[in-house]
Amino acid sequence: DAKTTQPNSMESNEEEPVHLPCNHSTISGTDYIHWYRQLPSQGPEYVIHGLTSNVNNRMASLAIAEDRKSSTLILHRATLRDAAVYYCILITGFQKLVFGTGTRLLVSP
Amino acid sequence: EAGVTQFPSHSVIEKGQTVTLRCDPISGHDNLYWYRRVMGKEIKFLLHFVKESKQDESGMPNNRFLAERTGGTYSTLKVQPAELEDSGVYFCASSDWSGGAADTQYFGPGTRLTVL
């Protein structure tokens, strides 16, 4: 399983943008970059995914480096509800998700 | 549309007893996954069904765990006999992936299992 590296924790203030980095230097050509998050006392929740190009959806944006060895999840305006653990995961096709320790995002009012 | 549901939400049992967890995937989703998080550890994959067939059961910890998905709809995960180290949160996820772009899995709220 291709591995990813994320910071253990990050902090943000409400209403500010948040950039969550992920390194995946051993990514293969067929790996998609997925982000999931887990809010307190809930199951993991899909956020966004991409292959090569930057992606936007209603929840977030995903910026992918040109060499695909790193990516950044961008929350444009953090809210208290965005406080969660964010996981960057590489998968190809239908596979088990391999969760690392993720990044715990703390959002202050 | 209803999401993935899991029952029960909590279960407290004695060591040596049997517990059965149930997962109802999103209607029409052929792929069903079980994961668990034991205390202080990362979320780990247990197994993957495609319809009623086990596609990948590489994460099942031992033969005390039995998963079934009769008819390709809901799934059950039985732990018999339960041990203390089985305590944790068990998550179920489903997807409708059938080829092409990578899978997106939808998770249930989890079942918290406590073995005393």
Image (cartoon, rainbow, N blue to C red):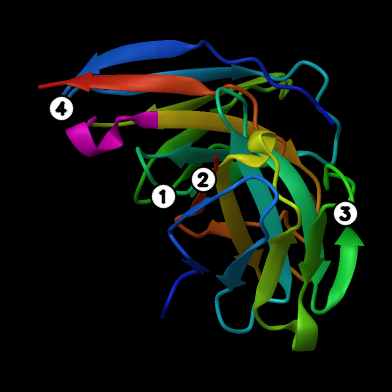
Magenta stretch in the rendered image: A78-84
Q: Secondary structure at mark 4?
A: loop
- Say whether mark 1 and mark 2 are on the same chain: yes
Check the picture and name the quadrant holding the N terminus of chain A: top right
Furthest residue toward bottom: B71
Q: Quadrant of residue B27?
A: bottom right
The CA distance from mark 2 to mark 1 is 7 Å
Any mark on residue A57, and which?
1
Q: Quadrant of residue A102?
A: top right
Q: Earlier in the sequence, mark 2 or mark 1?
A: 2
Q: Is residue B83 left or right of residue A34?
A: right
Chain on which label 1 sits:
A
Q: Earlier in the sequence, mark 2 or mark 4?
A: 4
Residue highlighted by disc 3: B57
Q: Position of residue B88 (x, y in %)?
A: 56, 40
At label 3, the amino acid type is Glu
Q: Residues within 10 Å of mark 4 (few under 14, many from 20)?
A: some
At label 2, the amino acid type is Ile
Is B50 in front, or is B77? B77
